[in-house]
Each structure stands twice: as C-alpha cells, then as structure tokens.
Amino acid sequence: MARTRRQPSERILIAGGAEDLVEIHRQLAELPENAYGQVFVEVALAEQIRLLPAPPRVTVTWLVRSARSSAVAPLVFADHGEALAHALTGWAAEWCVTGCEPRTSVWIGGADSPWIERARSMVQLELTDAGQQVQVEYGG
C-alpha cells in the first residue's frame, strides 16, 4: 500500500554530536513533511545550539554537556558522548517495544565515543528484539 500525505512515514531517530551537525542538518532537510521521530544532538556549550530544519513531527533535543554532571567521578561535566548515550538508551527503553512501528530508520554519529558505541549496540539489539525491521546507519 502506498503511503498518502496523511499517513506517517517510518519513524526516524537521528543522533550525534556537534561534529555531526552538517550531516544531521542534511538529513533533516531531506525528510518529508510527514516524517516523525526524534533527534538528539550533544554539544559542549549552549552557544552551539542552532535552529535545524526539522519537520513538525520531529523533535530536536539538545544535550548540553556543560549543564550535566558526569557518571565518571573525576569529571565535573558530562564526558563526550555520555549525555547522548543516556538519551539513546532512554529512547530505546521507551520506543523499542513489541507491536510498535514496524520500521525505524536510525542514524547515529559520534563515532569517536565509547559511550555512544555501547548505546548504538543496545539500540540495534532492542529494535531487533522488538521485532522491528532495523536500518541503523553510523556516522563519523
């Protein structure tokens, strides 16, 4: 069955850091108006937040590391990738359930963070375990 303008497109999850903003911007600009989903962007400082071209049903959440404490004792602020990894695992816990959307497209940047590597694996496993068709792309 072909999708109509009223039917939602597949759900999307886009996540990355400040170093991925060009790719995140490109992907958002190419989404159809009826796309829906979540975008997480981790930045070091609030000054790095900018307007992104997200369709109306795509939520963009900025994760500012300097505004978050770290789980690593000697660090004052969240480590590179830490806030993004927590957001990804929280998203997976909420959205990767059996009987949910049959398809989710996922793009996750932040290739240089061990925090994000673990979260990527978890998201892919959770989607698969929920019986969803998985298309996970990695950036970086």
Image (tube, grey):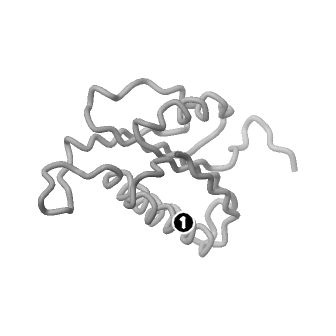
Q: Residue at x 48, y 27 (%)?
A: 52
Identity of the amino acid at label 1?
Cys
Q: Residue at x 31, y 49 (%)?
A: 80
Q: Quadrant of residue 100?
A: bottom right
Residue 110: x and y in percent read: 45, 48
- For this orientation, the residue located farthest to the right is 1
Residue 11: x and y in percent read: 62, 50
- For this orientation, the residue located farthest to the bottom is 129
Q: Is residue 37 above or below residue 101?
A: above
Left or right: where does residue 117 sit relative to residue 74? right
Q: Residue at x 13, y 63 (%)?
A: 73
Q: Which residue is mark 1?
A: 96
Q: Is residue 101 above or below residue 60?
A: below
Q: How many numbered discs, if any?
A: 1
Q: Is residue 85 above or below residue 5?
A: below
Crowd rating for badge 1 (residues with CA inside 10 Å; few <14, some 14–19, many 20+): many
Q: Is residue 27 above or below residue 104?
A: above
Residue 129: x and y in percent read: 60, 75
Left or right: where does residue 138 sit relative to residue 66? right
Residue 87: x and y in percent read: 38, 54
Left or right: where does residue 95 sit relative to residue 79? right
Element class at badge 1: loop
Q: Residue at x 39, y 55 (%)?
A: 113
